[in-house]
């Protein structure tokens, strides 16, 4: 008997609970990768339900199918080309009108569709009650109310999705526009008869009127007359309405979405502000908002440092007993020593990097899921604007504290090439989780948390200064910050922990092979007597200019692979994870070493992301500039610190 399989795609705006539904359905049977040939993250998972093996695909969160971002292209292409058995459109019940705009576009693709009316509990708190049966009747598709964070309605949602997939039912409602627009659509649909396109004829007609250049090229190859007619109709509509045809269609679609929402929604007369609203007003206040933000960030910073410190000590004590056991098993010969050197690298990776990476990602995803991250972005928008950066640049900048790679890729939300280049450059200077390991695991641990905090402030000052300088070099004006802030909500702990687990797995898969290879390479270099010649070749920079121990040059080279490797390789080279015991590696050297690693190019993955986003020439310029800048500022810092410490003593 053949295996019964179904493919279900989850589509919807951002922050509607799509990921929560995905995690609830797929549990641990999921994997994160990239879409073929794209840098956008792809989440897939499987489950077994009513005799079916179901593949769930979580499409990128988008607001429309009408624009041209990579995420929108991916969602549209997947639905129309891959043809999933059913699409579950997840919408936020508390902002139904805004979400229905995307629903109406999905209905135009003529695919089996089920509406997950999520966060109905939040809508109720806002005093919004929705007539589900009436909404189902108006849209002509199944509507299932859910509270994904509590698992309410998910079984029913999956049941309806399977039912629709089996019947291959498509939406019964056709979204009708004004008479003039409909006449134009009808004319184009008639001309499209016999033209074999991957999209439904009506959808093609609407997109041609909206001016979809990519689709125009495709149809022009099949029937040039259709495109010429579409342009003519579009121009006539523009003259008639006084606006572009795409604006007319968009306005009419919003009007339809608004009319449906008004018909099915019942608003309560209560005007008492909810706790979430009061919290939003407080955390976005022009004075109180900044005070809360600074105090929150300090508390977060201290929590990560404290938790990481305790975890690091615990793991160090745990692995301290492994050395005699290891040599007892493998002997003290050449092979045993080589294997222990590699093992030391792995232990250093576990005891130095993981204790800070794990709490960092838990906090980052907790802030993101709660809604506070977008409030920080809002508060920082004006400051970013004043220093010459695009208001939206704060979003990838905040992402950069987790990892510079997705932060660089996130810079594509910038409207112009100039803004994207500026944002990408500044984002690479943000200390990611790997550099946080060095700041907290070296400076914070051995010199005190106040020194680590001072380095973060110093890093921000440099980012702002270089951002301002780049703004002057690249002419143009920054644009205003336009972004959505979803309501405050208690983070879904399971989702936060799963996202942290995926990032941790990603770190283990990428970093640990590099750690093993790095430890093995260092041992080989040592065996062949090349360690000293390489270190000596770098000594004019490392020893003379930066004032660091001779051997640190080797560790800095490995930092190009991954930043946390600098500290791990340093532990391997020094033969200890207790850096306070290393001669010639005192407080000044610890700070200088951290400053250099904080500012030179993050890692090879970031370089790859830069090449993908801005081309290899600009990526090379940024890489060379940051290496030279890090060395220059490190040397200046060394000389200033000598004077400061001399005065202090």
Image (cartoon, helix red, strand yellow):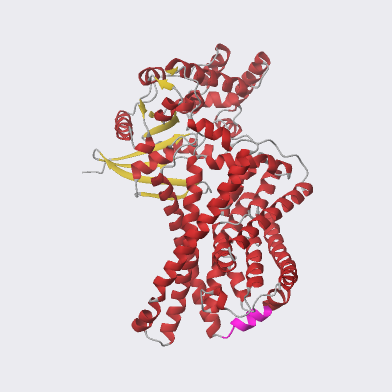
Q: Nearer the viewer, residue 581 or 63?
A: 581
Which of the 4 quarters of the picture holds residue 437? bottom right
Is residue 646 at all visible to an observer of this figure? yes
Q: Nearer the viewer, residue 138 or 402?
A: 402
- Residue found at x 62% / y 35%: 285
Against 554, residue 52 (above or below) is: above
Is residue 172 found left or right of 460 in the rendered image?
A: left
Against 435, residue 146 (above or below) is: above
- Outermost residue to the left: 1
Against 258, residue 109 (above or below) is: below
Relative image position of residue 64 (x, y in whole percent): 53, 31
- Outermost residue to the bottom: 333
Q: Nearer the viewer, residue 648 or 115?
A: 648
Is residue 62 found left or right of 623 in the rendered image?
A: left
Q: Nearer the viewer, residue 649 or 523?
A: 649
Q: Residue 32 lies in magenta, yes or no? A: no
The secondary structure making up most of the magenta span is helix
Is residue 232 found left or right of 323 in the rendered image?
A: right
- Residue found at x 38% / y 76%: 322
Look at the image and tell me in which quarter the N terminus lies.
Answer: top left
Is residue 484 at all visible to an observer of this figure? no
Q: Which residues are magenta?
A: 529-537
- Outermost residue to the top: 179
Relative image position of residue 14 (x, y in whole percent): 50, 36
- Residue found at x 34% / y 41%: 25
Relative image position of residue 187 (x, y in whole percent): 54, 17
Look at the image and tell me in which quarter the C terminus lies.
Answer: bottom right
Relative image position of residue 149 (x, y in whole percent): 38, 38
Against 361, residue 183 (above or below) is: above
């Amino acid at each position: 008997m053949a295996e019964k399989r179904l493919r279900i795609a989850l589509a919807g705006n951002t922050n509607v609970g799509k990921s929560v539904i995905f995690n609830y359905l797929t549990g641990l049977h999921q994997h994160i990768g990239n879409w073929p040939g794209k840098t956008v993250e792809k989440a897939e998972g499987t489950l077994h339900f009513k005799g079916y093996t179901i593949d769930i695909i979580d499409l990128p969160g988008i607001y429309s199918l009408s624009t041209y971002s990579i995420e929108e292209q991916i969602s549209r292409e997947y639905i129309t080309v891959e043809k999933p058995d059913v699409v579950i459109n997840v919408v936020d019940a508390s902002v139904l009108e805004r979400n229905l705009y995307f629903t109406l576009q999905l209905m135009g693709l003529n695919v089996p569709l089920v509406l997950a009316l999520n966060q109905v509990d939040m809508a109720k708190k806002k005093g919004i009650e929705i007539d589900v049966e009436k909404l189902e009747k108006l849209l002509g598709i199944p509507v299932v109310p859910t509270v994904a964070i509590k698992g309410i309605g998910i079984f029913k949602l999956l049941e309806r999705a399977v039912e629709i997939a089996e019947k291959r039912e498509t939406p019964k409602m056709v979204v009708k526009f004004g008479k003039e627009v409909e006449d134009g659509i009808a004319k184009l649909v008639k001309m499209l008869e016999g033209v074999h396109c991957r999209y439904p004829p009506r959808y093609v007609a609407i997109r041609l009127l909206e001016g979809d250049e990519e689709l125009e090229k495709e149809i022009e190859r099949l029937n040039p007359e259709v495109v010429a007619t579409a342009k003519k109709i579009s121009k006539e509509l523009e003259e008639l309405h006084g606006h572009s045809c795409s604006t007319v269609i968009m306005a009419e679609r919003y009007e339809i979405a608004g009319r449906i929402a008004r018909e099915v929604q019942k608003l309560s007369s209560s005007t008492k502000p909810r706790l979430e609203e009061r919290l939003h007003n407080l955390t976005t206040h022009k004075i109180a908002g900044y005070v809360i933000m600074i105090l929150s960030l300090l508390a977060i910073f201290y929590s990560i440092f404290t938790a990481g410190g305790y975890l690091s000590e615990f793991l160090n004590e745990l692995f301290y007993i492994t050395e005699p056991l290891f040599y007892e098993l493998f002997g003290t010969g050449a092979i045993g020593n080589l294997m222990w050197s590699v093992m030391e690298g792995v232990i250093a990776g576990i005891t130095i990097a993981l204790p800070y990476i794990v709490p960092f990602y838990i906090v980052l995803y907790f802030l993101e899921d709660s809604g506070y991250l977008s409030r920080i972005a809002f508060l920082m928008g004006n400051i970013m604007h004043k220093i010459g950066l695009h208001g939206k640049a704060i979003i990838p900048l905040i992402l950069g504290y987790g990892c510079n790679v997705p932060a660089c890729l996130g810079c594509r939300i910038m409207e112009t090439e100039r803004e994207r280049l500026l944002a990408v450059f500044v984002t690479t200077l943000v200390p990611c989780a790997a550099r946080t390991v060095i700041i907290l695991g070296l400076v914070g641990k051995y010199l005190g948390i106040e020194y680590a905090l001072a380095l973060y402030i110093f890093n921000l000052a440099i980012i702002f200064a270089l951002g301002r300088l780049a703004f002057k070099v690249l002419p143009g004006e920054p644009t205003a910050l336009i972004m959505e802030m979803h309501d405050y909500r208690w983070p879904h702990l399971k989702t936060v922990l799963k996202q942290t687990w995926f990032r941790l797995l990603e770190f283990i898969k990428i970093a640990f092979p590099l750690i093993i290879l790095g430890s093995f390479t260092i041992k080989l270099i040592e065996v062949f007597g090349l360690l000293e010649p390489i270190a000596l070749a770098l000594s004019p920079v490392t020893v003379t200019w930066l004032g660091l121990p001779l051997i640190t040059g080797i560790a800095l080279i490995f930092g190009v692979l991954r930043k946390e490797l600098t500290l791990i390789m340093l532990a391997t080279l020094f033969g200890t994870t207790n850096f306070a015991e290393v001669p010639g590696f005192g407080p000044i050297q610890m700070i200088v070493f951290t400053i250099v690693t904080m500012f030179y190019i993050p890692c090879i993955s970031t370089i790859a992301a830069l090449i993908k986003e801005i081309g290899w020439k600009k990526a090379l310029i940024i890489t060379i500039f940051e290496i030279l800048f890090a060395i220059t500022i490190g040397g200046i810092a060394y000389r200033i610190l000598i004077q400061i410490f001399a005065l202090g003593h």
